[in-house]
Image: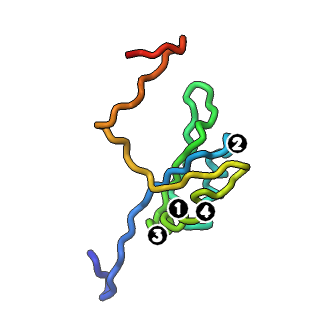
Amino acid sequence: MGEILGRSVRRTKNMKVYVGNLPFSVEQEKLKELFAPYGEIEEAVVISDKFSGRSKGFGFVTFKDDEAAKKAIAEMNDKDIEGRKLRVNEAKPMDPDRPRPPRRDFNQQRRF
């Protein structure tokens, strides 16, 4: 499957990019606009609080081409957007072996 009509085809995979320190005013469409100049975007998602709906200040952009994603990481990391320096890097799956910090209840007391 690596050749089509005598030509070799280089397969590229999708790459998900983490975007942190987003201004709270940035919504999904704006996030997509910020990263569109670097390549074709499959998905752009801003993570929001499930109760308030307010942005948590980070999101993910999935590029159809990993080279475009690498270019976006190189050029957008530390870029100032609305007074905040973005943190952009390759997204990594959560490590199931690394414990998460304890959650807080509504009374702001730690649960152990």
- Front residue of this view, candidates 5 and 24: 24
Q: At 37% across and 42% down in the image, what residue appears?
A: 94
Name the disc covering residue 41, or none: none
Name the disc covering residue 67, or none: 3
Check disc 3 and give the amino acid type: Glu
Label 1's element? Answer: helix
Q: At 60% across and 56% down in the image, what residue appears?
A: 78
Q: Give how far across and how far down residue 79 sits, in percent.
A: 64, 58
Whether residue 40 is visible to the viewer of this picture, yes or no, is no
Whether residue 3 is visible to the viewer of this picture, yes or no, is yes
Q: Viewed as shown, does residue 86 lie left or right of 60?
A: right
Mark 4 → mark 2, Cα distance in angstroms: 18 Å
What is the residue that sits farthest to the left in this orientation? 1
Which residue is under mark 1? Answer: 73
Mark 1 → mark 2, Cα distance in angstroms: 21 Å
Which of the two discs, 1 and 3, sits closer to the camera?
1
Badge 3, how many Cα within 10 Å: few under 14, some, many 20+? some
**On screen, residue 3 above or below 48:** below
Label 3's element? Answer: helix
Which of the two discs, 4 and 3, sits closer to the camera?
3
Residue 52 location, quadrant: top right
Residue 32 location, quadrant: bottom right
Question: Of label 1 and label 4, which has the lower sequence position?
Answer: 4
